[in-house]
Image (cartoon, rainbow, N blue to C red):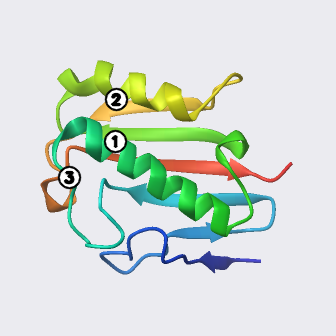
Amino acid sequence: MKKAIQTDQAPKAIGPYSQAIDTGDWVFVSGQLGLDPETGTLKEGIEAQTRQALENIGAVLRAAGLDYTDVVKTTIFLAQMSDFKTVNGIYGEYFSAPYPARATVAVKELPLNALVEIEVIARRR
């Protein structure tokens, strides 16, 4: 089983991909930028982009019938590793113990010149 998840509460895909794929037990949420779903524009600054990316993830999870507590793995892509402390602090407001496994990497560039992109994998309980 492979079902695309789509919600208007998160930005539309900016390429040939789904917001998420539901395989039954697992939901794979595509990388979310700090895009405002209403305007399609990036929020200003690392704090606003991080919060919006996480809000977008929450919207996609809800569309799949899940929430942040179902997330088992996250990957954070940063345009600048110097933003790690800021992103980490905001991230901690959305997830609680036991925290998901996580990788954080700095990349040369992100789509639309975003400062952060976050993807998650969630599992149905």
Mark 3 surroundings within 10 Å by alpha-carbon count, few (fewer than 14), some (14 through 19), many (20 or more) = some
Separation of marks 2 and 1 at Cα, in angstroms: 6 Å
Q: Is residue 112 left or right of residue 52?
A: left
Dot 2 falls on a residue whose secondary structure is: helix
Separation of marks 3 and 2 at Cα, in angstroms: 16 Å
Tags 2 and 1 touching, CB below 8 Å: yes
Above or below 8: residue 107: above
Pinpoint residue 59: horizontal percent, then vertical percent: 55, 61
Above or below 37: residue 85: above
Residue to which mark 3 is pinned: 110
Separation of marks 3 and 1 at Cα, in angstroms: 13 Å
Mark 3 vs mark 1, foreground winner is 1
Q: Is residue 50 left or right of residue 26?
A: left
Dot 1 falls on a residue whose secondary structure is: helix
Residue to which mark 1 is pinned: 50
Residue to which mark 2 is pinned: 87
Pinpoint residue 65: horizontal percent, then vertical percent: 74, 63
Q: Earlier in the sequence, mark 2 or mark 1?
A: 1
Mark 2 surroundings within 10 Å by alpha-carbon count, few (fewer than 14), some (14 through 19), many (20 or more) = many
At horizontal 16% and vertical 48% (from top left) the residue drawn is 44
